[in-house]
Image (cartoon, rainbow, N blue to C red):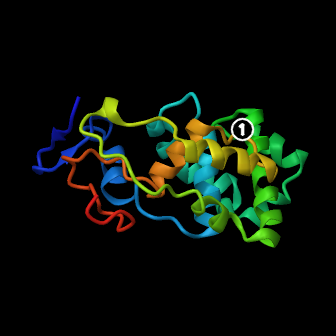
Amino acid sequence: MTTIIGDDGLARPPWAATDPLLREYYDTEWGMPVRDEHGLYERISLEAFQSGLSWATILRKRPAFRAAFAGFDPESVAAFTDADVDRLLADAGIVRNRLKIRAAITNARATVDLRERGGLVDVVWSFQPDATPAPRTITDIPTSSPESVALAKALRREGFVFVGPTTMYALMEAIGMVDTHLVTSHRRGSSGVWPGA
């Protein structure tokens, strides 16, 4: 399966071709570099909440997630208590999964602690590979890599949870560390991380 040409004449992968929200996300955000702590913490949190669900579900709930999790400010979320967990479990606007909610709090604390050792941004981006895939079809896109395995291990050593190799590869795609836009997509190479990819 390759790209689908939209009514605007642009080629997108099937997952981003029809749903307006996913199309907007693909065209403007997915695969663009994220090099700030706040942005990375939010994306790690959302990738964990997405596990087992569709990304469209997470995107539709992102405004509610941001409201519920103090704008994904790591210091604020790190201070959440059991009362906050109960509040979040009662919030129908988000994914109400106790383990994932606690993971977001645990990861906020780990993010704050990591500041003493270079910070989340430096740690994550230190696992950028030397080359990026050049997929021609959806089936050519990897779901993990040696770098995502190593990143997952490194983050777990720092106290992060819900950061498996597949989730970390999805993060790497979302933040432009790898460019898995299909070679026929209008977005291929748009991040500036992989010029000429």
| In this picture, residue 75 sits left or right of residue 68 | right
| In this picture, residue 83 sits left or right of residue 135 | right
Residue in the picture at 79% in, 69% down = 117
Q: In which quarter of the image is residue 71?
A: bottom right
| In this picture, residue 10 sits left or right of residue 91 | left
Residue in the picture at 84% in, 54% down = 80
| Residue projecting furthest to the front | 130
Asked if residue 41 can be seen in this view, the reply is: yes
Q: What element carries label 1?
A: helix
Q: From the viewer's side, name the closer residue of 126 and 89.
A: 126
Residue in the picture at 66% in, 59% down = 72
Number of labels in the image equals 1
| In this picture, residue 32 sits left or right of residue 185 | right
* Amino acid at pointer 1: Lys
Asked if residue 94 can be seen in this view, the reply is: no
- Residue 112, percent from left and from top: 79, 65
Q: Is residue 166 above or below residue 76?
A: above
Quadrant where the N terminus sits is top left
The residue identified by callout 1 is 100
Quadrant where the C terminus sits is bottom left
- Residue 95, percent from left and from top: 63, 36
Q: Quadrant of residue 56?
A: top left
